[in-house]
Image: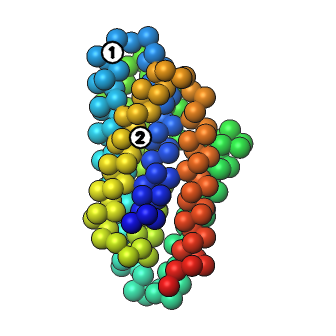
């Protein structure tokens, strides 16, 4: 269970960083608009992050029967790559996801369509990570629900945190997510039974 919570936190970091950026850009908006933005960010990011790993899990279930002995290595390598990608993007400043905090906020408001696009873009990694749910001794549906709830909470809090602090926490959230994904990948590869 602890591994799933760590995985959920790590996967939530992209959505958290985007939410911080949206909150920072909406600093001068009325409290009602901030509440609405936080609620929609939690809803969109939470649902996307909860559904995408389920797709990865189902695909992984089909493939793992053929690759049972290599499964811990495949899952571990996937998490190492995802974590390494997050770290690389933070260190190099190269992020291929939409510029949520700057470019998509027209007039400091975010449309439903933009939120959906951002939710899908930030949850693509979660689909790949869903493959590793086959390696954890836990119900995948429960794991996806935990990932959804953790992401929703982080996204909601991210909007308020961004409103208060600006964007300086965005990179730190991505860095933490990358380190946690790498640690889980190493654990799956070398310490799975």
Q: Residue at x 51, y 88 (%)?
A: 69
Q: Position of residue 64 (x, y in %)?
A: 42, 81
On-image quarter of the N terminus? bottom left
Q: Residue at x 42, y 58 (%)?
A: 5
Q: Residue at x 37, y 48 (%)?
A: 150
Q: Which residue ends up furthest to the front in the rendered image?
A: 2
Q: Position of residue 45 (x, y in %)?
A: 36, 42
Q: Is residue 38 left or right of residue 187?
A: left
Q: Position of residue 164 (x, y in %)?
A: 49, 21
Residue 117 visible somewhere in the drawing: no
Q: Is residue 16 above or below residue 37?
A: below
Q: Secondary structure at mark 2?
A: helix
Q: Residues within 10 Å of mark 1 (few under 14, many from 20)?
A: few
- Give residue 59's quadrant in the image: bottom left
Q: Is residue 76 above or below residue 158?
A: below
Earlier-in-chain disc, 2 versus 1: 1
Q: Residue at x 45, y 15 (%)?
A: 27
**Residue assigned mark 1:** 31
Q: Residues within 10 Å of mark 2 (few under 14, many from 20)?
A: many
Tally of numbered discs: 2
Q: Position of residue 184 (x, y in %)?
A: 55, 65
The dot on residue 97 is none
Q: Secondary structure at mark 1?
A: helix
Q: Is residue 140 above or below residue 34?
A: below
The dot on residue 154 is 2
Q: Which residue ends up furthest to the right in the rendered image?
A: 92
**From mark 2 to mark 1, how far is it between C-alphas?**
19 Å
Residue 6 visible somewhere in the drawing: yes
Q: How is the image coloured?
A: rainbow
């Amino acid at each position: 269970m602890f591994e799933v919570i760590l995985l959920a936190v790590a996967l939530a970091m992209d959505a958290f960083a985007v939410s911080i950026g949206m909150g920072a850009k909406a600093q001068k908006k009325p409290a009602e608009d901030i509440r609405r933005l936080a609620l929609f960010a939690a809803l969109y990011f939470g649902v996307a992050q909860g559904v995408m790993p389920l797709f990865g899990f189902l695909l992984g279930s089909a493939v793992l029967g053929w690759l049972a002995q290599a499964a811990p290595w495949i899952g571990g390598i996937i998490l190492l790559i995802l974590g390494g990608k997050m770290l690389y993007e933070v260190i190099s400043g190269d992020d291929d996801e939409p510029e949520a905090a700057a470019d998509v906020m027209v007039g400091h408001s975010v449309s439903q369509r933009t939120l959906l696009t951002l939710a899908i873009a930030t949850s693509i990694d979660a689909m790949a990570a869903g493959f590793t749910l086959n390696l954890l001794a836990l119900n995948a549906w429960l794991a996806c629900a935990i990932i959804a709830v953790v992401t929703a909470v982080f996204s909601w809090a991210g909007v308020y945190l961004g409103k208060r602090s600006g964007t300086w926490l965005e990179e730190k959230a991505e860095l933490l997510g990358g380190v946690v994904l790498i640690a889980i990948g190493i654990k799956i590869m070398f310490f799975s039974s």
